[in-house]
Image (spheres, rainbow, N blue to C red):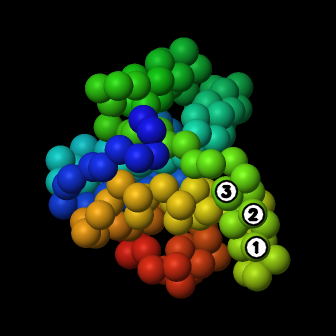
Amino acid sequence: MQSSTRIETALIVYADSSLLVRAYLPDEQDHARACALLRDRDTVVVTGTWTRIEVAGALVRAARAHRGDQMLMLDSWERDTGPEGPVTVLSAPQEALEADAHDLVITYGIRAVDAWHLACASIVVPQIAGDEPVAFASRDKEQAEVAAARGFTLV
């Protein structure tokens, strides 16, 4: 989906990899929360392009640790990020995204990939949300605090 597309819904939630991967791993603490987010019909879940790689990598590692069937988990993830799936994958202009992520790392001392997700959410979500409420979903406390500081509601 192009970042200029406008989505109209009750709530737009940018979900980072730390939460999304839990939807595919039943033994994870926030599995039910992640599944509920993906099933919520009043919510549009969006994420950045890098999430596809992060989640796939986490699922492969989980399968190698005998926590699930690799092909089933990857097929489910691919369906969920496909055209009919509950997760919309968005892209942001690379230069702006990297500059914002760099500033976040320096200002808040958060991990680079957490800064990348916040920068992506900050650049893309307001463009598609218009007046709709926006939120950020993460399992990482520091990242969530920075998201709240940037005006995102936490879910």
In which quadrant will I find the C terminus?
Answer: bottom left
Give the amino acid at mark 2.
Ala
Instruction: State the separation of the CA atoms marked 2 and 3.
Output: 6 Å
Near-viewer residue (68 or 94): 94
Query: Callout 2: helix, strand or loop?
Result: helix
Q: Against 118, is 42 above or below?
A: above
Query: Callout 1: helix, strand or loop?
Result: helix
Tag 2 near tag 1, CB within 8 Å = yes
Instruction: State the separation of the CA atoms marked 2 and 1.
Output: 6 Å
Give the amino acid at mark 3.
Leu
Q: Is residue 130 visible?
A: yes
Instruction: State the separation of the CA atoms marked 1 and 3.
Output: 10 Å
Seen in the image, is 106 located left or right of residue 152?
Answer: right
Q: Which residue is mark 1?
A: 103
Q: Which residue is mark 2?
A: 99
Q: Which residue is mark 3?
A: 97
Tag 2 near tag 3, CB within 8 Å = yes
Seen in the image, is 147 located left or right of residue 81?
Answer: right
User: Few, some or many C-alpha atoms within 10 Å of disc 1 (few <14, some 14-19, many ≥20)?
Assistant: some
Picture residue at 35% right of the left edge, 25% below the top: 83
